[in-house]
Structure formats: structure tokens, C-alpha cells
Image: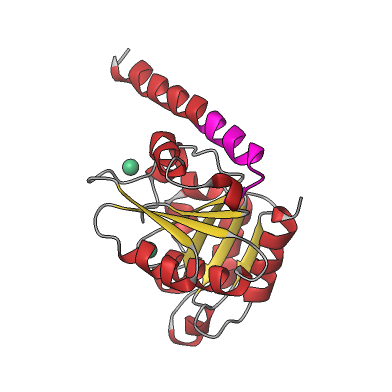
């Protein structure tokens, strides 16, 4: 037996326990929290900007942005109207429950209704680390190609919703939507999906309705 496996399992279960504590904290404060995962450049920050701009009148929003370096994304979320916290992971390619706990300590949770967590751009390990958010959302985008569900099954199989961004580019890119959706369906049957374009705002209303439906008490 390789000795590393139990170590990894222990790390994950310690993370899960902390994630549970994060969830309790969020629930006690009445916050609905979403973990947004995607490859780099899929549009996580842009979707956060649009979501914040559209919902800021009804909800008190915060964004927690995980990045290996810089505060560019948190600055954008703040400019859109959210209370924004940047987590620099110092090279780590995913967020974990400890990082979310530390970020939550910087927020006045009782002054918030909705929390958007932007994970590090990566289609592999963010799936393995629960944060304690209520929903895990994957953002795919048309330029990444239609084969991603087949190549990154771990990311697709456990998420609660799928955003398919940049659909305005469909006329210019060889992206077989049927092939893509078949791959998704195999891994995560019945997964709710939102084809959107942040550029043209197409499909954004459906996404926002999903957020509002989940966020309402
Ligand atoms: Mg970003
Ligand atoms: Zn990682």
C-alpha cells in the first residue's frame, strides 16, 4: 500500500470538517453562498461583476476572490458594488475551507445576504476541496472546446449547476453543443445549465433567477 493515500484522505476529511463549520456560520448569518469554479479565462470574474451589478439593489453582496497572485479580480468585484476580499493562495491552485474561513473572518456576515466565491482558475483540484458554500457552480466557456466534460470528469460530476459562457462566440468556433451536453449528461444527469453570454447579456436573466430562487429564505 502506498503510504501517501491515508495522508491525503486525512487532509480531505479535515477540510470537510472545516467546510461544515463554514456552512454553519453562513447559515447562522442567513447567507446564501456559491463557489464558482472554472478554468482561467472562462469568465468567473465577469459573471460575478454582472451578478453583483444586477442584484446589488436587492441583496447585500460580497465576493471572495481566490487567486495565486494580485487583487485584480477583487478590485473588479468591488467596483461592481460588492464587498470584496482577495485571497492570495501563495501558489496553491485551489481554495480550501481554511482559506474561506479566514476570509469570512474579515467580513461582517450579518450585513450580507449573498456571497460569491471565485475559486482559483483550474479544472482539476478545486473539485476535491469543499468550502462550505451551499452550491458549487462550474463555468464552462465556448472557446475552451466541447471536449472538457470528457477530459475533466471530476469537475463536472459533482457540481450543482453549469454556466456555459461566451455563447455569442458559437458562430466562430467549432463547438458541438450536443456532444458537450451529452458528456455533461453522462457525468451529472439532469444538471441545470445556463447558456449565457456576459458580453450580450443573453441568458443572464435565467442565471439570476436561479440565484434569487436559492437565496430567498
Ligand atoms: Mg477571475
Ligand atoms: Zn490545487
Q: Is residue 26 magenta?
A: yes
Residue 78 vertical position relative to residue 3 in the rendered view, above or below: below
Where in the figure is residue 144, as x and y percent of width and height?
40, 68
Residue 57 vertical position relative to residue 108 in the rendered view, above or below: below
Tell me if 20 is positioned left or right of 172 in this view. right
Q: Is residue 1 magenta?
A: no
Tell me if 160 is positioned left or right of 146 in this view. right
Tell me if 40 is positioned left or right of 192 in this view. left
Where in the figure is residue 58, as x and y percent of width and height?
68, 67
Residue 10 versus residue 108: which sits nearer the camera? 108
Say whether residue 187 is visible. no
Q: Give the residue at x 36% y 66%.
A: 75
Question: Could you tell me which quadrant the N terminus lies in?
Answer: top left
The segment highlighted magenta reads: 19-33
Where in the figure is residue 70, as x and y percent of width and height?
25, 59
Q: Give the residue at x 55% y 68%.
A: 52
Q: Give the residue at x 36% y 24%.
A: 8
Residue 26 versus residue 207: which sits nearer the camera? 26
Q: Give the residue at x 74% y 59%.
A: 213
* Among the 4 quarters of the image, the one containing residue 114: bottom right
Residue 44 versus residue 87: which sits nearer the camera? 87
Please give the count of numbered marks on the rendered protein: 0
**Main structural element of the magenta stretch: helix, strand or loop?**
helix
Quadrant field for ligand 2 = top left
* Among the 4 quarters of the image, the one containing residue 162: bottom right
Amino acid at each position: 500500500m502506498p503510504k501517501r493515500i491515508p495522508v491525503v484522505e486525512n487532509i480531505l476529511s479535515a477540510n470537510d470538517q472545516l467546510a461544515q463549520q463554514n456552512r454553519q456560520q453562513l447559515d447562522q448569518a442567513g447567507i446564501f453562498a456559491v463557489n464558482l469554479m472554472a478554468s482561467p479565462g472562462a469568465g468567473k470574474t465577469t459573471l460575478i461583476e454582472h451578478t453583483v451589478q444586477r442584484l446589488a439593489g436587492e441583496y447585500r453582496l460580497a465576493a471572495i476572490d481566490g487567486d495565486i497572485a494580485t487583487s485584480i479580480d477583487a478590485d473588479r468585484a468591488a467596483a461592481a458594488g460588492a464587498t470584496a476580499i482577495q485571497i492570495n493562495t501563495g501558489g496553491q491552485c485551489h481554495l480550501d475551507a481554511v482559506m474561506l474561513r479566514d476570509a469570512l473572518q474579515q467580513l461582517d456576515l450579518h450585513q450580507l445576504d449573498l456571497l460569491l466565491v471565485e475559486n482559483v482558475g483550474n479544472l482539476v483540484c478545486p473539485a476535491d476541496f469543499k468550502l462550505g458554500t451551499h452550491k458549487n457552480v462550474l463555468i464552462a466557456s465556448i472557446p475552451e472546446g466541447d471536449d472538457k466534460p470528457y477530459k475533466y470528469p471530476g469537475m463536472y460530476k459533482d457540481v450543482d449547476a453549469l454556466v456555459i459562457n461566451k455563447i455569442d462566440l458559437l458562430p466562430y468556433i467549432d463547438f458541438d453543443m450536443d456532444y458537450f451536453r451529452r458528456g455533461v449528461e453522462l457525468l451529472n444527469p439532469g444538471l441545470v445549465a445556463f447558456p449565457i453570454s456576459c458580453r450580450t447579456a443573453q441568458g443572464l436573466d435565467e442565471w439570476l433567477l436561479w440565484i434569487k430562487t436559492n437565496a430567498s429564505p
